[in-house]
Image (spheres, helix red, strand yellow):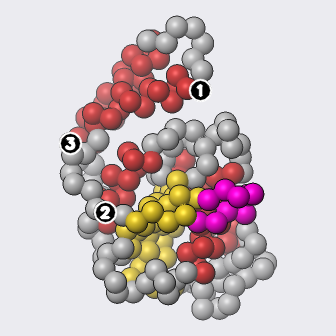
Amino acid sequence: MPVNSSDATFFEHASKIMKQALSDINGEPTIDDIRGTIKYFKKYLSDEPLLPFEVLLIPSSYASHKIRARFIAQGSETRPLIIFFPGTAFMHDMFDENYTVLSRMMKRIDAHGLMLEYRLSPENPYPAPHEDASDALQYVLDKLEGLNIDSHKIVISGHSSGANMAAVLCNALQHTTACMPSQYQTPSGVPLCRGL
């Protein structure tokens, strides 16, 4: 997808915005100060209308935690699924900002979309986000029929820290021995696996 003019403007100004935001802080910035800098970026969000989504609460392997996910159903037919892990630097609550990216993608793709709101650091240190990613994928594979997902067309993607999560998850899928039935395979025939 080409970079549009509003994205280009955002990247041109990002460094200046961060310097200004951090200069408003007295003393050493706290995690809350750093998270607060995100408000300076909100004006660069697209004003394009967003697609509606359904909130899914995915069971987690971590205690009683539920993983919140935004699911875009593009009709009731069986379709491919784009799983999108948002860029948050693993610590910023930027799920609304990242949803604009997923919404824009889904308007151009004939597929369902899922964006995971994974646990953030430092409250939930590594490997918490990656555990949430694994749990979410397992949930999707267990609910394929109910969510109208084509089991042979699942794309795992992400932006920035979310791209790291996608890469780690895909790598884990290739190196796990406890595999699922052969119906869940990558196009190259590598089975998708349980027990990540």
Q: What residue do we see at 58% from left, 53% from top?
A: 118
Residue 94 pos. (x, y %): 45, 43
Q: Tell me if residue 107 can be seen.
A: yes
Q: What residue do we see at 38% from left, 30% from top?
A: 39
Screen quadrant of the C terminus: bottom right
Q: Is residue 142 left or right of residue 1?
A: right
Q: CA distance from mark 3 to mark 1?
A: 31 Å
Q: What residue do we see at 67% from left, 62% from top?
A: 60
Badge 3 amino acid: Ser
Residue carrying label 2: 52
Q: In the displayed image of the protein, which residue is found farthest to the top?
A: 26
Q: CA distance from mark 3 to mark 2?
A: 25 Å
70, 18: nearer the viewer: 70
Mark 3 residue element:
helix
Q: Earlier in the sequence, mark 3 or mark 1?
A: 3
Mark 2 residue element:
loop
Q: Tell me if residue 171 can be seen.
A: no
Screen quadrant of the N terminus: bottom left
Name the image quarter holding residue 125.
Answer: top right
Q: What residue do we see at 45% from left, 12% from top?
A: 23
Badge 1 amino acid: Ile
Residue carrying label 3: 5
Name the image quarter holding residue 8.
Answer: top left
Single out the mark in the foreground, 2 or 1. 2
Q: CA distance from mark 2 to mark 1?
A: 32 Å
Q: Is the residue marked by circle 2 packed among few (<14), some (14-19), or many (20+) residues within 10 Å?
A: few
Q: Earlier in the sequence, mark 3 or mark 2?
A: 3
Residue carrying label 1: 31
Q: Magenta stretch: give its range.
A: 58-66
Residue 77 pos. (x, y %): 34, 86
Q: Is the residue marked by circle 1 packed among few (<14), some (14-19), or many (20+) residues within 10 Å?
A: few
Q: How many marks?
A: 3
